[in-house]
Structure formats: structure tokens, C-alpha cells
């Protein structure tokens, strides 16, 4: 029988506090360690969450007791750390993105294929209510043949300053200027995550280089990437013939929701979302000339948000902007599959965190692949990495690499049960 999970959480910054208690509570986990270059952060976590400290990432990799690591370092650092961890024989949970260097992706897949270690990337977009709604309807054929979809991740730099300052200090702007498409997975995962097996074949992208934030975005060393774009939009030609428009915006007059599907159309059905309300349409099977339109908000919003929408729409919109429902689940999310130990525990990013921890733990325990395994998340990451190159070349159409489907003899865990 497999050992229980003994996991070291690497990086005690702003995001991982939402995950340490979940790892600790999961029935497959025996021990949680925390680690940070800033020792005081690890000490604070150890005290707050009642977990042990491991001195360094290298010590975690060298430890015979620790069998898993969870990488919660800054967004540019994941790829190389994941590769090192897999080489050291550790199972890996990684925060998004997978990597900002597209060559890492094939290496991670190769290591996972050879070692059969667990790799799971914690993509919140995969479990957002809209993605699940569209995935369910797509898989049962309600959309018919997919033709066009749109998703975006809008997060203004003004609301990200604290996150970048957390590790970047006074130099935070240099990190904040990371190309928006180096962090594409919240939006790509919503369209591609709704259509398992589908991937992008070609990309063309355009960037907005006229941001007023010249302290952050520009080619002249304002940031570590010589990145001029605060906002980038890309068009993807998909393997099923459909088209997707994805945009990543860092200077934008918008608050919440941050990540959402605006449109998802097939030739037999369509989904749209606007601020609070979700709509779904299908051709009437009994009348060839009629389309049945439905409001599906009740399925896709947490009950508290839905009730407010019904009572006072203006108030609901304002409340959504202020984060109402951010930690709650919607009826469409398959919460029944989660361990009972998670009942009543925090579940941020619209009720998604618990699924991500559970997927990693179930994948490790069963030896099956996590739904967000490397083959799946490669398809969320590649389009952005290539899309940025396209935008830097004025929208040149580029081929998007694909590492294919998971090995045939390696079953993927169901995401809904
Ligand atoms: N919705 C989402 O999925 C979502 C939301 C927020 C953040 N994130 C991701 O989570 C990650 C962490 O974000 P954050 O806001 O907590 O960042 P942060 O800068 O606050 O924290 C990162 C921490 O990692 C530590 N660290 C860096 N290198 C290390 C090393 N080698 N060994 C030990 N510690 C090390 C830093 O000292 C810092 O405390 C980012 O990659 C971000 O993209 C994802």
C-alpha cells in the first residue's frame, strides 16, 4: 500500500494560506510542512496552521520523509522547480502557471511519463461554475459542434500591487510587467477545459502597448521581460475547427468576476454570461425553427448570490464587484465528491480550491492522473506562451505545439465524482 501524503508547501506568501489548511485536512495527508526563503513567513504559517517547517526547497527534495511538494512560489518560478522536484522523485502540486518557458512543458511531461509521479496544476478556471456548466453540456452533446468561444481574465495591476510587492518589494514593478499571456491559464482553461481533448493549433495575438502605466509596461527595461503589453488578446484556431478569443487584461476598468466565459457557442446550443446572469439556448427538438432560451443563473451562482440577483439586481451587481460568493459553491459544482473533512472550510476563487487539493490527493492515492495533469495543462499554457511571441511580431500567425493526450494506459480521474 502507498504511503500517506507527506507534503512540503514551498512558498508561504499570499496565496498558499488558502491551501495549507486544506492539505492538512485531507484524509490522504499525514503531514504538512511549510518552507519559505523568508523564514519568518514559514514560522508564521507553522504557528497559524500547526504544521512543521522544512528549512529549504533543497532540504524538502533531499528528505526521505517528504514524498510530495506543492509549489506556491512566484509565477515565473514554477517550471524549473517542478522539474527539480520530479527529478528528486517527488510528486508535485503546482500553482499556475505551469511555466513561463515553453520548453519546460515537454520536459515535465517526459519526467512524469517516465517516473509515473503525480503532477497536478491547480487551475481554478477548470472548476469555475461556467466551465463546469459548459463542459457538462458539451459532453452530453447539447452544444453540437463547437464553433466559437470567448473567455478572459481581467485583473487590473492596481489590484495586484500587494501580490507583486509581497516578493518583489520596492522592485515589484519589474515583476508586475510580466507579459499577460505568460499567465493565460485562467482564461484558456475555461474554453479548452470545457472541451476535453481539444487544443489550439494556431494563434494570432495583438497587444496593447499604450498603457498609461509606463512605470511597468515597456520595452526599455521597465520590467524583466522587456514586455510592452499591459493587455493582450489572442485568437486561437482549435483542433475541432472551432475558434476561441482569449484576452488577458492588466490595465482595465473592471473588477469582478475576474475570470469568465462571455460566449460559448455550438451549432446546436449557446451559453452566454454577463456580470451576474448565465443564459443557455438550444434549438427546439420539436420545432426546427425555434430556439429555446433559458436563464440558468440558479445553477451557476451560489444560492446567496442568486437570491440577491432575484431580489435586487443592481445591489447584486455591486455585491459581485465586492466579492460576494467568492468562497461559495454553485449547485453545478460537484461538491458531493469532496471529502467530508472539507465541510465548512474555506473554498476560494468561487468554490474551486477544494477540488484542486482533492484532485492532487486522489491522483497520488489512486495512481491515476489528475484531471489537470501535464497533458491537459500543456494545452492551457502553450497558447499564451506562443501568443505573446505572436503579439511581439505584430500578430504573426504561429503554430501552437501540442504534446498529445495522456498515455493510453494511464486513466484520468473523473472531475465530477
Ligand atoms: N487563482 C489562482 O490560481 C491564483 C491566485 C493567486 C496566486 N496564484 C499563484 O500562486 C503563486 C503564489 O502567489 P502569491 O501571491 O502567494 O506570491 P507571493 O510572492 O506572495 O509568495 C511567494 C512566496 O514564495 C517564496 N519563495 C520563492 N522562492 C522560494 C524558494 N526557492 N524556496 C522557498 N520559498 C520561496 C517567497 O519568499 C514568497 O514568500 C503564484 O504563482 C501565483 O501565480 C494563483
Image (tube, grey):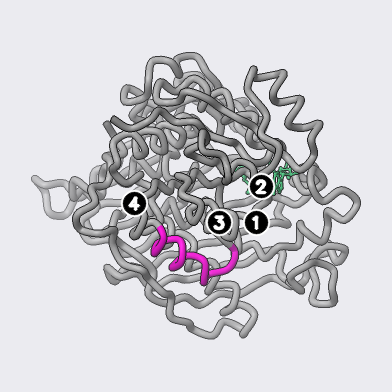
Q: Mark 4 highlights which residue? A: 116
Mark 4 and mark 1: span between their CA atoms?
23 Å
Q: Quadrant of the N terminus?
A: top left
Which region of the structure is painted magenta? Answer: 100-111
Q: Mark 1 highlights which residue? A: 77
Q: Nearer the viewer, mark 2 or mark 4?
A: 4
Q: Mark 3 highlights which residue? A: 84
Q: Mark 2 highlights which residue? A: 73
Crowding at mark 2 (Cα within 10 Å: few <14, some 14-19, many 20+): many
Q: Position of residue 210 (x, y in %)?
A: 77, 71
Q: Give the structural element (helix, strand or loop) at label 1.
A: loop
Q: Is residue 256 toward the left or the right of residue 121 in the image?
A: right
Against 114, residue 311 (above or below) is: above
Q: Residue furthest left?
A: 286
Does residue 316 show up magenta in the picture? no
Mark closest to the chain's N terminus, 4 or 1: 1
Whether label 2 lies within 8 Å of ligand 1 gets the answer yes
Crowding at mark 1 (Cα within 10 Å: few <14, some 14-19, many 20+): some
In the rendered structure, are the residues bearing label 2 and label 1 in contact, judged by CB atoms less than 8 Å apart?
Answer: yes
Mark 1 and mark 3: span between their CA atoms?
12 Å
Mark 4 and mark 3: span between their CA atoms?
15 Å
Q: Is residue 403 toward the left or the right of residue 11 in the image?
A: left
Mark 2 and mark 4: span between their CA atoms?
24 Å
Residue at 32% in and 43% down: 280
Mark closest to the chain's N terminus, 4 or 3: 3
The one nearer the camera, 284 or 372, is 372
Quadrant in the rendering for residue 114: bottom left
Mark closest to the chain's N terminus, 2 or 4: 2
Q: Give the structural element (helix, strand or loop) at label 2.
A: loop
Q: Position of residue 84 (x, y in %)?
A: 55, 56
Q: Nearer the viewer, mark 4 or mark 1?
A: 4
Amino acid at each position: 500500500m502507498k504511503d500517506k501524503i507527506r507534503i512540503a508547501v514551498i512558498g508561504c506568501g499570499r496565496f498558499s494560506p488558502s491551501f495549507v489548511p486544506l492539505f492538512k485536512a485531507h484524509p490522504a495527508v499525514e503531514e504538512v510542512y511549510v518552507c519559505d526563503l523568508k523564514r519568518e513567513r514559514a514560522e508564521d504559517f507553522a504557528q497559524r496552521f500547526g504544521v512543521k517547517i522544512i528549512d529549504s526547497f533543497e532540504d524538502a527534495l533531499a528528505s526521505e520523509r517528504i514524498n510530495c511538494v506543492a509549489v506556491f512560489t512566484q509565477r515565473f518560478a514554477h517550471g524549473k522547480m517542478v522539474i527539480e522536484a520530479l527529478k528528486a522523485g517527488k510528486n508535485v502540486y503546482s500553482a499556475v502557471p505551469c511555466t513561463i518557458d515553453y520548453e519546460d512543458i515537454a520536459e515535465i511531461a517526459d519526467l512524469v511519463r517516465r517516473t509515473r509521479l503525480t503532477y497536478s496544476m491547480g487551475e481554478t478556471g477548470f472548476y469555475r461554475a461556467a466551465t463546469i456548466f459548459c463542459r457538462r453540456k458539451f459532453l452530453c452533446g447539447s452544444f453540437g459542434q463547437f464553433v466559437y468561444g470567448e473567455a478572459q481574465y481581467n485583473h487590473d495591476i492596481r489590484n495586484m500591487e500587494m501580490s507583486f510587492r509581497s516578493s518583489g518589494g520596492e522592485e515589484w514593478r519589474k515583476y508586475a510587467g510580466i507579459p499577460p499571456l505568460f499567465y493565460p491559464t485562467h482564461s484558456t482553461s475555461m474554453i479548452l477545459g470545457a472541451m476535453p481533448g481539444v487544443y489550439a493549433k494556431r494563434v494570432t495575438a495583438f497587444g496593447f502597448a499604450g498603457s498609461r502605466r509606463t512605470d511597468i509596461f515597456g520595452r526599455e527595461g521597465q520590467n524583466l521581460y522587456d514586455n510592452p503589453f499591459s493587455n493582450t488578446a489572442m485568437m486561437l484556431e482549435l483542433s475541432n475547427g472551432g475558434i476561441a478569443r482569449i484576452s488577458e487584461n492588466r490595465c482595465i476598468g473592471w473588477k469582478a468576476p475576474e475570470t469568465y466565459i462571455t460566449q460559448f457557442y455550438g451549432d446546436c446550443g449557446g451559453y452566454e454570461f454577463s456580470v451576474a446572469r448565465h443564459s443557455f439556448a438550444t434549438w427546439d427538438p420539436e420545432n426546427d425553427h425555434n430556439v429555446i432560451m433559458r436563464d440558468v443563473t440558479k445553477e451557476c451562482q451560489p444560492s446567496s448570490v442568486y437570491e440577491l440577483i432575484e431580489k435586487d439586481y443592481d445591489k447584486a451587481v455591486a455585491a459581485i464587484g465586492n466579492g460576494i460568493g467568492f468562497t461559495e459553491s454553485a449547485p453545478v459544482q460537484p461538491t458531493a465528491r469532496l471529502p467530508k473533512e472539507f465541510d465548512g472550510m474555506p473554498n476560494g476563487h468561487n468554490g474551486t480550491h477544494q477540488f484542486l487539493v482533492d484532485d492532487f490527493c486522489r491522483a497520488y492515492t489512486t495512481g491515476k492522473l489528475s484531471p489537470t495533469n501535464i497533458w491537459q495543462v500543456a494545452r492551457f499554457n502553450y497558447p499564451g506562451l506562443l501568443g505573446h511571441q505572436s503579439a511581439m511580431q505584430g500578430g504573426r500567425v504561429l503554430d501552437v505545439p501540442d504534446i498529445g493526450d495522456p498515455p493510453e494506459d494511464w486513466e484520468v480521474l473523473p472531475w465530477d465524482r
